[in-house]
Image (cartoon, helix red, strand yellow):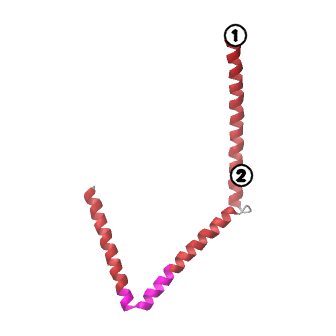
Amino acid sequence: MHRTVSITRAEKKEEERLEKERINELKKEEPQRYLQNLYQKRKDILQKIEDRNKKKQELTSRKNRIFQRRMQIIAELGYENEKVLIYLFRLSFFSFFLYLFFSFF
């Protein structure tokens, strides 16, 4: 297992080294194309950040369907838990009286 991990690690380092060499060659031979690629990567990253922020903003909005559905699920779970708690309380209350009743006899 260690051998395969070390081989994989070495292959990955070799790929990274080749990629760096390719980038350096591209910088020297075609600086315009290199800059275009750089700007495109930057643009993609900014778009992802903007999409993430927009999605986060939508999730905090109380008017969208996703938020309303989430609140509905939370309310239903709370209602079910309340029923269970009431049942357990009644059960424990009843068992307490049984204990008192049988402890005197």
**Could you tell me which residue is drawn at 72 percent across and 33 percent down?**
86
Identify the magenta region. Answer: 25-41
The location of residue 99, given as percent across then percent down, is 67, 17
Q: Does the magenta stretch include residue 104?
A: no
Compared with residue 53, is residue 82 higher up or lower down, i.e. above or below? above
Q: Name the residue under label 1.
A: 104
For residue 89, side relative to residue 19 (left or right)? right
For residue 32, side relative to residue 94 (left or right)? left
Q: Main secondary structure of the magenta part?
A: helix
Question: As shown in the figure, which amino acid type bears the numbered disc 1?
Answer: Phe
Task: Tell me how many marks there are.
Answer: 2
* Front label number (2 vs 1): 1
The location of residue 43, given as percent across then percent down, is 54, 80
**Could you tell me which residue is drawn at 74 percent across and 62 percent down?**
63
**Could you tell me which residue is drawn at 63 percent across and 67 percent down?**
55
- Quadrant location of the C terminus? top right
